Image: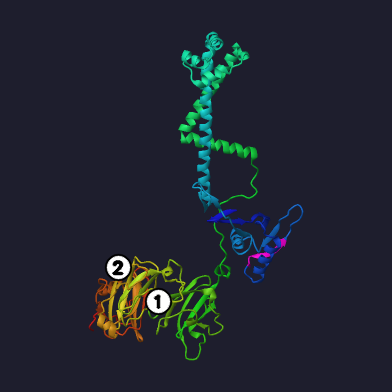
Amino acid sequence: MYRTGRGMIRMRATFEQENGDIIITALPHQVSPAKVLEQIAAQMNKKKLPMVADLRDESDHDDPIRLVIVPRSNRVDKEALMAHLFATTELEKTFRANLNVIGLDRKPGVKTLCQLLNEWIAFRETTVRDRLQYRLDKVLERLHILEGLQIAYLNIDEVIRIIRSEDEPKPVLMARFGLSEIQAEAILQLRLRHLARLEEMKIRAEQEALDKERQFLEKTLGSPARLKTLIKKELRADAKAYGDDRRTAIVERREAQAITEEQLAPVEPVTVILSANGWVRAAKGHEIDPGETTYRPGDRFLDAARGRSNQPVVFLDSTGRSYSLSAHTLPSARGYGEPLTGRFVLPAGAIFTSVIMAPPDQQLLMASDAGYGFITSFEELITRNTKGKALLSLPKGAQPLPPLLVDNITGHLLAAVTNEGRMLVFPLDRLPAIAKGKGNKIIQISAKQAREGTDRLVHLTLVPSEGTLTIHAGKRFFKLTAGNLAQYMGERGRRGKKLPRGFQNVDRLESEAPLQAPLGLPLASSNESEPTDPER
């Protein structure tokens, strides 16, 4: 049993492990074993508990509650399995406690358990303090009387004479010995048999005992710490004398969590295929060639991503928004799939442009053809909103570029090429890492040219330090080694430098890590004569 909130108490079944099986030994109040078995069996029939192989009720006279859950294998996480059952069956039940009581302010009100205990402790302190004060008053009163009796015993002859000779002995005794009215009355109430020597010794002993008690009471009342210690001792003594063993343990537990469909689904490699018309499907394995699969008439291959079935899939549209789904929820690649417009609400005129699958901490380079970009992580692209998440802010007339996976920011160069044939290369760490937005300028493109589309960023690629960049223009290509790349290096946001004639209409860029050449053999830089003069 544990408390979950104001007026809410949860009771949870107890279980133990025996030879790899889970044995439920106690159920919450008013929960029947048959109901629990029915609920677990229903999940097994719906294939929502693939980790459970069998379920038995072995309850008998000796064991009133004994429900046996047999896991499918020893690799099953039994704690996670029970947390799922607590969250989805009556193995855990919530009870409402209406703590509507009259508080210390003499007014009724609904109290939390903490408020109730604090007010009870305050009430207990007041009660114990009043009890001790009452006892102290009685002790002081008795000591006062004993002091007067002691005076009487020391002057017994004179006391007897006054009593025998005076018509009103009380005021005479008070005046003669300096007694109070209470002391004089106590002396007059004495019986003759109490005048013995032994009775005087008893009075002295009673005085000593009461004086010790007085000191204890005064110290306790004068010290809050001593008062609390006394209350604790009394509570422990009462618990020992009248308490019994608790039948329901109060234990702090984490909230039970049901196993999600993603956790239940088998983890296997998948290839997510996106068509130009926004239809999506998932094929098992990574060996499939997305370009060779069949598409609906008028449709064609657009993009694909490879990952695992338990990973999220992110789709990007032409307005810079991101959308995400769980991979295991996508239709099979045996058919044409289904349109993403049935799952998401796109802005007017928007179309899907790319699909991504990656670990949550995978870094990505997001950019627009207006020449702006930034670095973010894959987890920043994930959203549950069917309208997507505003990720890349686009200037008017701009379009997003396909995102680039970034394995390491430091030690890499970023090569940017425009449709005019200008190329700029700069260290990747000069680009900011932000969650979303427009980003910083990668290469200089005027706002007017970006709106009109006459000049735009068309290609981006990452080049490892000391690596090689291959530029493809039609059937021709040439390679730029680390030394030749230096002539295109510049500050981020500059215009860059024109590529050689014949290579300004770039089709694609490819980068290679540096190779270790055998001793004495130079690395080849191209399969053609390498142009170095930009105006040649």
Residue 511 sits in quarter: bottom left
Instruction: Give x and y (percent) for residue 434.
Output: 35, 68
Instruction: Judge whether residue 54 is colored magenta.
Output: yes
Instruction: Give x and y (percent) for residue 175.
Output: 46, 15
Q: Residue furthest right?
A: 61
Image point (52%, 74%), residue name = 327
Image point (74%, 58%), residue name = 58
Residue 406 sits in quarter: bottom left
Image point (64%, 62%), residue name = 90
Q: Amino acid at mark 1?
A: Arg
The answer to whether residue 371 shows anywhere in this view is: yes
Mark seen at residue 430: 2
The stretch of residues the image draws in magenta is 49-56
Question: Between residues 277 and 189, which one lies in front from this camera angle?
Answer: 189
Give the structural element (helix, strand or loop) at label 2. helix
Q: Quadrant of the C terminus?
A: bottom left
